[in-house]
Image: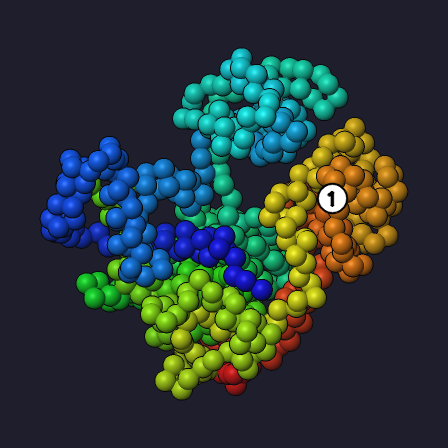
Amino acid sequence: MKNSPLLLGFMLVLGIFLGKGLYESEVNLPHFSTRLNSVLDQIEYLYVDTIDRSALEEIAVEAIVAELDPHSLYLTPAEIKAMSEPMEGGFEGIGVEFLVSDDTLMVVTALPGGPSESAGIRAGDRILKVDGEDISGTDLSNSRVMKLLKGEGGTKVELGLQRSNGDKYDVTITRARIPINSVVASFKLTEEIGYVKVIRFAATTALEFAQAMDDLVANGITKVVIDLRGNGGGYLKAATEMLDLFLLKDLDIVYTEGKSSPKQVYRSQYDGVFASMPIAVLIDESSASASEIFAGALQDNDRGLIIGRRSFGKGLVQEEFEVAIDGALRLTVARFYTPSGRPIQKPYGDNIDYSSDHSTRVESGELFHADSISHTDSLEFQTLLGRTVYGGGGITPDVFIPLDTTKVSRVLAELVWSGALRDGAFNWVDKHRSNLNELKGYLDLENSDEWNDPVEGGLAEMFKEYKELTGFVADCDEEESRMIEKRFLAQVARNLFGEDEFYKATIEDDEYIKTTIYEMLEDQWFTQREGVLYLSPSLSDN
C-alpha cells in the first residue's frame, strides 16, 4: 500500500496557510545572491540558444527551497490564486456545480442562493452556449469552463441552455460572490448526539461551524462529534475561533516559536457557550495542521475525546513573503506546539523518507494496532488535569480505531478519484429526472437493502444500469461490489438531497461512528468541574 502523492500534495498545500498573517514585522533581507545572478547573467547573454531567464530563476528558487523542509514552497501568482479561493471561502462566478460529460457541460446543481439558482437554472440543464459561442465539443475541459463562467462580480454572461427534456432557453446572469463551504454536513446521529463534518479550516469555517452547532442544539443535541478525518488544515484563526466555543477563557490553545520568531501563545478569548458539552473529535493519518491544533488543544485541556489514528504530523508555521517581480515564498519560520509543549511536527530530514510516511505506518503496524505507535519517555507530556499524552509528531488519539483493510477497495478508490462514480450517478439521476418526485418518495437510505425503486426495481438494478451507462467492468468479489453499490447510492443521494444525505449514507457502517456513539454514551469518560465538562484524569493511556 503506497502513500498517495496526491494526498501528500494536499497536506502540503493546505498546511501552508496556517501561519498566514502571524508575523507582521518587516524583515530587511540582503539582495539575491550575486553568485546566482552572475551565473544566470552568463547563461542569458552567452549561451548558444535563447533561454527564458525567468523560467530558470523559478527552477533555481524551487530547488533552493526544496532543500529546507517539506512545507516551505515557492509559488507562482497563478498557484497562489488557485489555492487561495477555497481558503478565502468563495469565488466570483455564476454559482453552479458542473461536470463535462460526452463533450457537453452539464449542471450538477445550481448552488443555493447563487445567481444561477435565481435565474431558474436547474440540475440536469446543459449549457450549450456562452456569450453566443457554442462550447460543446472535444475541446471542452474543466479549465476552459472555469475561464468561461468565472469572472469579476457584477459582470454579465449570456447562457444558452437546454433542459433534459430537450427544451431550450436563454438567460443572462450577473456574476456574484459564490461561497465555498468548509462545513459540508451537520445532522443528528442519535437523539442526543450531533455530527459535524469539517473538510478544511478556511476564512468562513468558524461562522459556518457556529451556525451548524446552533441548528443542532435547537434540534435537541447535547453532545457533538466533529469529524476532521482527511482535513488537511488551513487557517489557524479558524481553529482558534472554533475552540473558543468549547473552552473557558484564557486557556492555552497553541504556541509558536522559531529561531527568529519569539514565542507567541494563543489563548481562548472567552468562556465558551459549549464549555459543558461532551465533544468527540475524529482524526486519522490524513488530519493535519489546523486539525491537529484543534484536536491537540482539546486533548491537552481535557475537554474532548480524540478518536481514531495518529494524525499526519504537520506542525511547521509558514509565512508568505513577496518575491521580486512576481510569485511568493512561503517560508517555514516557526513550529507549533500544543498547550502541554508537544511539538506537532513529525521528524524530517536526512535518512527520513517524508513522502513515504503512510507506507512506514502500514509496515510498522501502527495503523492496525495501538501498541505499535512508537513513544519514548522523553516525549511524555501532561494534560491540564494530569493525563499522560505523547509528542513525537501528530496527535495520538485517546481511543484507537484500527484501519479495516476489508473495507478498502482499490476499484472503488479508482472510481471515486477518476470521477467515474460521480459522473455515472449523475447520469443515472439525469436519465430518470422526469420521475424524480416519485423517486424521492421511495428513497430510504436507512433501509437501502430493501429499497424498492419504482423506476428500475431496486438498488441492484440501479447499479446494473450504472455499469451499462459507464461501461464499468471490474473483477470484484461480492463484498467489494456491495461497497461500490452503496457508494453509488450515496452519490445518488447527494444529487437528490445534498451533502447531509451523502454523509449519512457513507457513515452507515463506519466503525468510527459506531465506536464514538458507544463511547459518548458512556458517562465514565467525563467529569463535571465548576460547570465545565472535562475528561477524567483516571482515563490516561486508554
- 406, 353: nearer the viewer: 353
Q: Reply above or below: 294 against 167.
A: below
Q: Residue furthest front?
A: 48
Residue 537 x/y as whole percent: 49, 83
Q: Amino acid at mark 1?
A: Phe
Residue 96 x/y as whole percent: 56, 31
> Looking at the rendering, in which quadrant would you find the N terminus?
bottom right
Q: Reply above or below: 470 against 398.
A: above
Q: Reply above or below: 99 against 498.
A: above
- 192, 499: nearer the viewer: 499
* Relative to 201, 501 lies left or right: right
Q: Quadrant of residue 328?
A: top left
Residue ID at (46%, 53%): 10
Q: Reply above or below: 316 against 451.
A: below
The local secondary structure at tag 1 comes to loop
Residue ID at (26%, 54%): 64
> Looking at the rendering, in which quadrant would you find the C terminus?
bottom right
- 15, 409: nearer the viewer: 409
Q: Is any part of residue 330 visible from this angle?
A: no
Q: Residue furthest top?
A: 132
Q: How is the image coloured?
A: rainbow
Q: Is any part of residue 471 visible from this angle?
A: yes
Residue ID at (60%, 74%): 368
* Relative to 258, 224 lies left or right: right
Q: Quadrant of residue 308?
A: bottom right
* Relative to 489, 373 lies left or right: left
Say which residue label 1 marks.
472
Sort mark 1 into few (<14), some (14-19) or many (20+) by Cα contacts within 10 Å: few
Residue ID at (59%, 78%): 369
Residue 42 x/y as whole percent: 14, 41
